[in-house]
Image (spheres, rainbow, N blue to C red):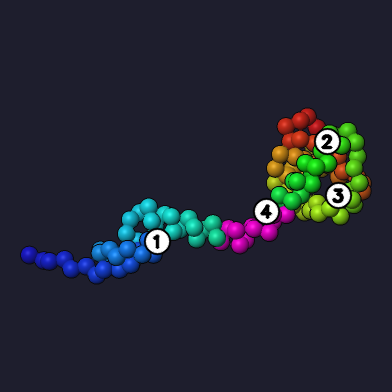
């Protein structure tokens, strides 16, 4: 009869000691393994996309601020919006349709006309 003697190791998530039944086991349960790996993944994702996401949110707020004045009808000065912090290199989608380049940013979209004007739409409106 073989007696199993497992080494006690510390869970990387909660710090509790548990019997290490395999040499590569680092967590006391599956939930702690998932929680740890999700936290590591989110930290890496934030490091990679964090700046772009904050630029996207800032640009979206600028579009939101100026939307009532445009509403898909009036042209706004692109340079003024860029001076406020609108980053035209950040988008969630770009669609080219009928020779128009529509740039989507969350719940807004806009069209740049002759590199000097911008028309803002809500994403769910007809363009």
Q: Secondary structure at mark 2?
A: helix
Q: Pinpoint residue 94: horizontal percent, then vertical percent.
A: 74, 44
Specify the label residue 68 is tagged with: 2
Between the residue at mark 4 and the residue at mark 3, the CA separation in whole angstroms equals: 18 Å
Which residue occupies 76% across, 30% down?
Answer: 125
Residue 10 shows in the view: yes
Residue 50 included in the magenta stretch of the image: yes
State whether residue 22 appears in this view.
no
11 or 126: nearer the viewer: 11
- SS label for mark 3: helix
Residue 22 % position (x, y): 28, 65
The answer to whether the residue labelled 4 contacts the one labelled 1, judged by CB atoms less than 8 Å apart, is: no
As displayed, is residue 45 above or below residue 93? below
Q: Which residue is mark 1?
A: 13
Mark 1 secondary-structure assignment: loop
* Residue at 50% in and 61% down: 40
Q: Are marks 1 and 2 in contact (CB under 8 Å)?
A: no
Residue 2 appears in which quarter of the rendering?
bottom left
The residue carrying mark 3 is: 81
Q: Which residues are magenta?
A: 44-55
The answer to which of marks 4 and 1 sits earlier in the sequence is 1
Q: Is residue 36 left or right of residue 70?
A: left
Q: CA distance from mark 4 to mark 1?
A: 28 Å
């Amino acid at each position: 009869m073989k007696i199993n003697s497992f080494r006690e190791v510390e869970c990387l998530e909660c710090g509790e000691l548990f019997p290490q039944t395999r040499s590569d086991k680092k967590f006391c349960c599956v939930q702690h393994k998932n929680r740890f790996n999700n936290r590591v993944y989110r930290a890496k994702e934030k490091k990679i996309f964090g700046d772009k996401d904050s630029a996207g949110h800032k640009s979206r707020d600028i579009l939101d601020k100026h939307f009532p004045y445009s509403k898909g009808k009036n042209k706004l000065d692109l340079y003024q919006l860029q001076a406020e912090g609108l980053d035209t290199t950040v988008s969630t989608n770009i669609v080219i349709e009928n020779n128009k380049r529509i740039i989507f940013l969350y719940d807004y979209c806009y069209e740049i006309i002759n590199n000097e004007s911008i028309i803002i739409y809500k994403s769910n409106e007809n363009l």
